[in-house]
Image (cartoon, helix red, strand yellow):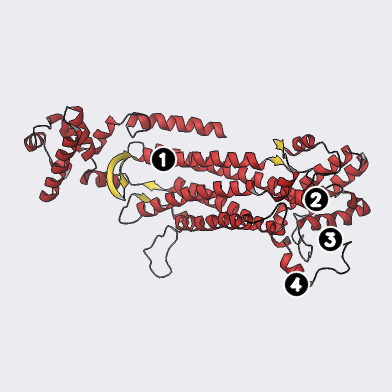
Amino acid sequence: MKLWGGRFDEGPSETFERFSGSLHFDRRLLHADIRGSQAFARALEGVGILTAAERGQLEAAFDEIAADAAHPGFFDAATDEDVHTLVIRKLKEKVGALSEKIHTGRSRNEQVSLDVRLWLRGEIDRALELLGGLMQALLDCARRDPNAVVPGFTHLRRAQPVLWAHYLLAYFEMFARDVERLQQARARVNVLPLGSGALAGSGFPFDREAIARDLGFDAVTANSMDVSGDRDFALDFLYAASTTMLHLSRFAEDWILYSSEEFGWLELGDGVTSGSSLMPQKKNPDSLELIRGKCGRVFGDLSSLFMTVKGLPMTYNRDLQEDKEPLFDAADQLNGSLEMAREVIATAKLNPARPAAAAEESWVVATDLAEALARNGTPFHQAHKLAGKLVLESLRTGRKPADWTAEELVKFAPEFTPAMAALMWPAEGMKSREIRGGTGPQAVARALEEAQARLSKLS
């Protein structure tokens, strides 16, 4: 059935039907469409279009459709233009002519916007829940090895020693910002469009605030023309999803490297890795590689909708049908990747001896030495040069930091003191970095407690 047609002598061609149909993907909005239509039935009762009995009959029929949709084959052989016409057809099968009242004063333009908002609100809530689980996994991982020392990198070169927990908290902060972005996107999603009509507002005096309360929306839209062509809320979600995926991709890249034989820091769980069809020894980080790869899909979803919307005149245009598949895909990839990343973290095991050895054999302590000289009165540029010369001499002679005795250090340059020999061990120099946000052991312990408290407030 069609929700239009009186103005036409002939129906759409088979080619146009096939080209324009969207049921194969917008069927995912079925439960949102039913929920929105039930609320609209209550609104129609409020303006006298439906009696209480008719409203009750329609609500019950919608419940039956929702229950029917759980059965296999519900969509089989359906030739409806979209999910909205399918629901109306099913409704007519159950209540007959009464179904023709449900669309009174309602446009498919606002109906689609409502359905997408209802569906997207649920997906964002799911993403926020999964982000919370991922962030908890990071904190749990940090607590398993609270004293582990690893090299921190710049330019992928060993730079300064940090606690493993400090490194994990860096990703916690990234994901905390992602939570904020998703919450902000949800706030813009959670505005009721119903009552806007096709573009000029409804001709019936609906209580829009009451409908908003009924459906759990925080506010109502302010301009009916804006509603008809607005997909900013979808772009907001896609941007938040893209940034979250970006952080997941960076995390995946790190752990692919750290679990390689060359690093040997991490052992990934068997359940999140795969083998080779040819090489028996392989244990591949496929889960992380897929996360990294799916990031590109979500970026593409954002770009796709950007390009779709950029040249549209006011108000609704059928181009906006193309908003759903990018949204659906981005939500699927985001939530799947969040779930996968949490499992990777939960099942990974750190081999603390390997990163500790990497820190101890390199010169990640050089900055600690230079700063100790500066604290002792040596101008920093001179201190930097002295530490650099010590590194150069060590590289020439094949000496690691711990090979230097206190006496040799003082002999190398009188600015060094015997006490500074302790700084040749990475864990010692970190104790000077107890500033808030630093990698000092006490600062990191406090940061872990604060992170747990912040996370608890999100749940």
Q: Are marks 3 and 4 in contact (CB under 8 Å)?
A: no
Q: Separation of disc 4 and disc 2 at Cα? A: 25 Å
Q: Nearer the viewer, mark 3 or mark 2?
A: 2
Q: Residue at x 45, y 30 (%)?
A: 450
| Kind of element beneath mark 1 | helix
Question: First in sequence: mark 3 or mark 2?
Answer: 3
In this view, the mark in front (3 or 1): 3
Percent across and percent down for residue 17 are: 77, 68
Q: Which residue is mark 2?
A: 107
Q: Which residue is mark 4?
A: 15
- Residue at 45% across / 46% down in the picture? 345
Pointer 3 residue: 2
* Disc nearer the start of the sequence (3/4): 3
Give the vertical position of 396 relative to 6 (above or below): above
Tell me how far mark 3 sits from mark 4, CA to CA: 16 Å
Q: Which of marks 1 and 4 precedes in the sequence? A: 4
Residue for point 52% across, 48% down: 338
Q: Position of residue 76 (x, y in %)?
A: 76, 64
Q: Secondary structure at mark 4?
A: helix
Say which mark, if any, is on residue 132: none
Q: What residue type is disc 1 on?
A: Ala
Please tell me in which quadrant of the rendered image residue 443 appears. top left
Marks 4 and 1 close (CB-CB < 8 Å): no
Callout 2: SS? loop
**Quarter of the image containing the N terminus?**
bottom right
- Residue 382: x %, y % from top left: 16, 36
- Gap in Å between the C-alphas at discs 3 and 2? 13 Å
- Residue carrying label 1: 170
Horizontal arrangement in the rendering, residue 406 relative to residue 118 (left or right): left
Q: Earlier in the sequence, mark 3 or mark 1?
A: 3
Mark 2: which amino acid?
Ser
